[in-house]
Image (tube, grey):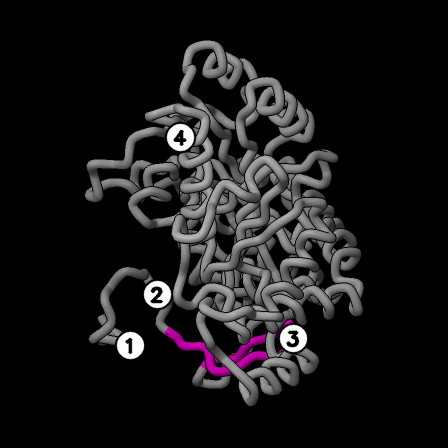
Amino acid sequence: MPAPLMPHVMPTYGRLPFALSHGRGSRVWDTDGKEYLDALAGIAVNTLGHAHPKLVAALQDQIGKLIHCGNYYQVPLQEGLATLLVERSGLTNAFFCNSGLEANEAALKIARKYGHDQGIDLPEIVVYEKAFHGRSIATLSATGNPKVQQGFEPLVPGFVRVPMNDLAALQEVARSRPKVVAVFLETIQGEGGINPARNDYLQAVRKLCDDKGWLLMLDEVQCGIGRTGKWFAHQWAGIQPDVMPLAKGLGSGVPVGAVVCGPKAAHVLQPGNHGTTFGGNPLAMRAGVETIRIMEEDGLLGNAARIGGLLKAGLQRELGGLPGVVDIRGEGLMLGVELDRPCGQLLGQAAEAGLLLSVTADKVIRLVPPLIFSEADVAETLRILVPLVKQALAAPAA
């Protein structure tokens, strides 16, 4: 058994036995010089790939000016990034934090205060089976994974759980739970196995929220910022949420989170209700502004849709219909291949073959590459991944 690479770091991750040194575009290299094609992008974070020259220059410029100043003062870059997000979402106001967990935590606080402002003393929030919203005690409680929750009880009360895409279950909640104030779901569940909410379901939930006076809160932490070929995944359904948490790809690797709200939720939080030391710092805001600018200059929404379509079609052509392949699903460059058996070993096997990916929900191969992925990258992904999947399916069941 090799000695751990970082013996003084808390053992909270099951890491592979190598360390990445540097990257360029869709490629990374480890400290031994081995090259990998990155189809994981830091778990849907590195929107522009690695060392994008426009982003590097902008961040170097910002570091030479101001990294952090605190929210006692106006931060013009916050106004700039908020404007970009509002213009692309059709919503009205943004709050900035540091991560998806923090964005989701803020959304939960907005929902609770929204309920209290209406005189509801114990407001409830509808959440979903297989959901993942973070690892704080509150977002852990909203998450629909008992393995993640185990050992951290008691969970925070006030959540009502329903299955994804089951409108009858949600309608029953509407009939039987008078203290519900919001519906909170990932437009495409990431950690839960790349499970999309159907467009017709999202449209029906939007209408139900309008009818009941509930907030519709769509977690776009993983599926937002162009990953599906639109700025936000819910835009495929032609709807708008009231509250939209963002993070991951918004800063192309610089930690940043946001909660973007529409009129029903934008002024629920007032001075003193919420805050953050690092949230909205100039460096993170510059990363967000430049990410959006570069995405538009380089046509990355269209690239995500086109290249994601090629990758999905290739996976369906090579793997669809094989015994043991349950489903191939997702949108743009957020794709999952579900097998009928655990396949965690593919994480290490693919890395050994030069491809970075992840396995989530035990049985789902997750592909969330940078939005700069090319046709050649798709071909290489298929060349490496398809034989490994076939090998896994041919192996005797454990």
Report the amino acid beneath label 3. Answer: Gly
Q: Are marks 3 and 1 in contact (CB under 8 Å)?
A: no
Q: Which numbered marker is on residue 5?
A: 1
Q: Is residue 90 visible?
A: yes
According to the image, label 3 marks what residue? 25
Residue 300 magenta-drawn?
no
Spatial CA span between label 1 and label 2: 9 Å
Badge 1: how crowded within 10 Å, few (<14), some, or many (20+)?
A: few
Q: Is residue 251 above or below residue 95?
A: below
Q: Earlier in the sequence, mark 3 or mark 1?
A: 1
Q: Secondary structure at mark 2?
A: loop
Q: Earlier in the sequence, mark 1 or mark 2?
A: 1
According to the image, label 4 marks what residue? 116
Residue 280 rendering spot, x and y as whole percentages: 51, 65
Q: Nearer the viewer, residue 73 or 180?
A: 73
- What range of the chain is rendered magenta? 18-30
Q: Are marks 1 and 2 in contact (CB under 8 Å)?
A: yes
Nearest to viewer (mark 3 / mark 1) = 3
Q: Earlier in the sequence, mark 4 or mark 3?
A: 3
Spatial CA span between label 3 and label 1: 26 Å
Q: Are marks 4 and 3 in contact (CB under 8 Å)?
A: no
